[in-house]
């Protein structure tokens, strides 16, 4: 069987094309969707993520500012910084780049972002809305996965979906979205995790697998059924001496191994990652619309 490669870039271009129409309408009313991105410390990967997000914003004539705080920022100072941004009408969205330095409790800090500016969808209020089937801001990676399924017309209705991973960032929200009574929902969803006794049993029976684990090449062709659709969220670095950098980036699924057996798969890189940044833009535009009370 030919395995279709579900390229994130094609989906991203479609979403951005739709967004650019809305952004132009907003500009006519002097509203420029604006994001405040906070980065604490100098983790190089986090810096790279934030700069790629900022680039995507400027390409679509949206505004973003990066606020870099020192790694020894206290909880009180970080919360005060966030509260000032909550009250600052210049910014429609606030992104707190994770992970935070160890002395800061992520859950405690995320709760201080105003829910109507929580464009990363990590505030408990926004995660609760998803559980209730009334999403406000959907966290960007799960939202990107849904957009990929939608764009490539991968029907989830009545399908058996296995989500591997149960993080608040990816696993739990995507599992909740896919099980709701929505278009691109209505699936029978099983969540697998580190304590799952026989991962194979579940993945082998799945019509759709969403892998959000962080273990390189965990899933191979013996673990999937013929014709399965695979969304690979994982981003893992593995050593590769043939590359200048000394490593390459792979997903949680052994891409080459499943080719020919899976119906479709998102590549890593070039799949879900592209969509995460795009959906941050989408959420920020949505926040601008709500806050400006227009359209
Ligand atoms: P996490 O570490 O918070 O969660 C990983 C989950 O995988 C846990 O719930 C754990 O129970 C489960 N798990 C770990 N090992 C397992 C195993 N052997 N079998 C079954 N389950 C296992 O990670 P996360 O933040 O959810 O991210 C998961 C992966 O997705 C990482 O590789 C991360 O880099 C990537 N990610 C990608 C994007 C993107 O834009 N593409 C965004 C966020 C995260």
Image: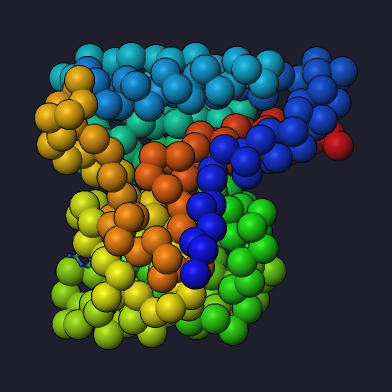
Q: Quadrant of ligand 1?
A: bottom left
Instruction: Name above or below for residue 35 compared with residue 262.
Output: above
Residue 123 in view (yes/no): no
Residue depicted at 76% across the width and 28% down the height: 20
Q: Give coordinates of residue 127: x percent, y percent.
A: 48, 57
Residue depicted at 87% across the width and 18% down the height: 28
Instruction: Name above or below for residue 102 compared with residue 44.
Output: below
Q: Quadrant of the C terminus?
A: top right
Residue 273 in which image quadrant: top left
Q: Give coordinates of residue 145: x percent, y percent.
A: 52, 54
Residue depicted at 80% across the width and 32% down the height: 22
Residue 159 in which image quadrant: bottom right
Residue depicted at 35% across the width and 75% down the height: 224
Q: Is residue 257 left or right of residue 26?
A: left
Instruction: Name above or below for residue 40 compared with residue 17.
Output: above
Q: Give coordinates of residue 257: x percent, y percent.
A: 30, 61
Residue 179 in view (yes/no): yes
Q: How is the image coloured?
A: rainbow
Camera-side residue: 66 or 163?
163
Q: Give coordinates of residue 67: x percent, y percent.
A: 39, 15
Q: Is residue 151 left or right of residue 127?
A: right
Residue 259 in which image quadrant: bottom left
Number of marks in the image? 0
Camera-side residue: 289 or 61?
61
Q: Is residue 276 left or right of residue 57?
A: left
């Amino acid at each position: 069987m030919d395995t279709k490669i579900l390229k994130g870039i094609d989906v991203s271009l479609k979403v951005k094309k739709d967004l650019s129409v809305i952004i132009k309408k907003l500009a006519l009313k002097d509203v420029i969707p604006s994001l405040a991105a906070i980065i604490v410390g100098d983790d190089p990967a986090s810096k790279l993520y934030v700069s790629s997000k900022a680039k995507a914003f400027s390409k679509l004539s949206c505004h973003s500012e990066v606020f870099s705080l020192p790694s020894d920022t206290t909880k009180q100072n970080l919360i005060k910084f966030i509260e000032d941004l909550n009250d600052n009408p210049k910014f429609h969205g606030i992104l707190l780049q994770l992970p935070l330095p160890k002395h800061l409790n992520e859950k405690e800090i995320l709760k201080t972002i105003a829910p109507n500016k929580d464009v990363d969808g990590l505030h408990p209020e926004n995660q609760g809305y998803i559980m209730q089937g009334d999403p406000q801001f959907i966290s960007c990676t799960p939202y990107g996965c849904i957009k990929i399924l939608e764009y490539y017309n991968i029907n989830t209705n009545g399908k058996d979906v296995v989500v591997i991973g149960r993080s608040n960032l990816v696993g739990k929200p995507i599992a909740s979205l896919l099980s709701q009574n929505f278009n691109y929902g209505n699936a029978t969803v099983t969540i697998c995790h580190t304590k799952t006794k026989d991962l194979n049993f579940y993945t082998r029976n799945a019509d759709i697998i969403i892998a959000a684990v962080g273990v390189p090449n965990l899933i191979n062709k013996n673990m999937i059924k013929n014709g399965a659709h695979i969304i690979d969220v994982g981003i893992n670095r593995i050593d590769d001496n043939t590359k200048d950098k000394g490593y390459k980036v792979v997903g949680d699924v052994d891409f080459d191994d499943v080719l020919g057996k899976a119906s479709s798969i998102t590549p890593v890189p070039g799949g879900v990652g592209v969509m995460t940044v795009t959906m941050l833009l989408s959420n920020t535009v949505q926040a601008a619309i709500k806050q400006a009370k227009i359209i």
